[in-house]
Image (cartoon, rainbow, N blue to C red):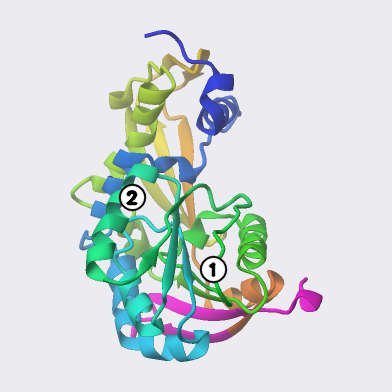
Amino acid sequence: MAQATVDVLGDFGRASVAGLSQPRKTVAARYFYDDRGSRLFDEITRLPEYYLTRTETALLDEHAAAIARLTGHGRPVVEFGAGSAAKTPMLLRATHAPVYVPIDISGEFLHESMAALGRTVPGLRIIPLTGDFTKPLRLPPVDGPVTGFFPGSTIGNFDHRSALDLLRLLRNMLGEGAHLVIGIDTRKDPRLLEAAYDDGAGVTAAFNLNLLERMNRELGGTIPVDAFEHRAVWHDGLGRIEMHLVATRSMSFRVAGRSFSMAEGETIHTENSYKYTLEEARLLARASGWEPLACWSDADHRFGIHVWAAMPDEMQP
């Protein structure tokens, strides 16, 4: 295979080369989600250790009507990072949404998921949008104020400054009069958190390692994937789970035409997942142009679903 060049390969190539060139190697979590990565994450959401999806799903099922009363009925729904959209029908039905705009970076997986959703919610107009919602996107024209849906505590993948920037961007994309229904994971027993990101079946490990396999597939990489191990650890002072790929031996390899080396024990930092208290989540909302209206949590306070309203333009921070 001819060696790939960064200029030809776009964002993933540039991000991989830049991240692997750092003294502390890192690659952004959004690059997990090629077609295989999206399918593996969908499998993760069904694991017994991964409490996030089933807890959020139960909260949506219980409180969808109350959420709809706050956001309004008959509004278009825009979902950021739609994936399989497994939880979305509850919100769509409760709000009587006429139009649904799912946004996801993996186009093939997105269109497969939307074909299934169309059968689940007949009569719904679906306008899939393939793209990276962490960058400005032009939404398709829809009538009236919009309800944004940002489930799964995806906001936790961003450090605090980046989370504020992203939430401001979503506010600007959705516009004045919008609401945001957002799922946010909470701080809790570290053993529960670490198990959720390092399951016994090894699916999360495969998901993490797929990032290296993607570099080999798409960037002409020669990474010895079997020389890496998945690691997930909780950092209490930072309030986050970290995921790493740990080199089990010294090695050299190439990615996108560039040479790299790693020592035994060195890591590639692939994901952060920040966890928030209720008050921290409210501060995050207000600092990014949203007014918190309500929050629902399970009996064990493992997860929260929040409804926020866009602050008027003149009140934007």
Residue at the outermost left position: 201
Where disc 1 sits, the SS reads loop
User: Left or right: where does residue 23 sit relative to residue 188?
Assistant: right
Quadrant of the snapshot with the N terminus: top left
Residue 31, position as x, y percentages in the image? 46, 40
Where disc 2 sits, the SS reads helix
Front label number (1 vs 2): 1
Any mark on residue 155, and which? none
User: Left or right: where does residue 84 sit relative to residue 147?
Assistant: left
Q: Is residue 173 visible?
A: yes
Three-letter code for the amino acid on which mark 2 is drawn = His
User: Left or right: where does residue 221 sit relative to residue 13?
Assistant: left
The mark total stands at 2
Which of the two residues, 186 or 265, is positioned nearer the viewer here? 186
Three-letter code for the amino acid on which mark 1 is drawn = Val
Residue 97, position as x, y percentages in the image? 41, 77
Q: Residue at x 61, y 60 (%)?
A: 163
Determine crowd level at label 2: few under 14, some 14-19, many 20+ residues with C-alpha closer than 10 A: some
Quarter location, residue 228:
top left
Any mark on residue 111, and which? 2
Q: Residue at x 42, y 8 (%)?
A: 2
Q: Is residue 279 visible?
A: no
Magenta span of residues? 293-317
Residue 58, position as x, y percentages in the image? 29, 79
Q: CA distance from mark 1 to mark 2?
A: 20 Å
Determine crowd level at label 1: few under 14, some 14-19, many 20+ residues with C-alpha closer than 10 A: some
Quarter location, residue 83:
bottom left
Q: Which residue is mark 1?
A: 142
Quarter location, residue 185:
bottom left
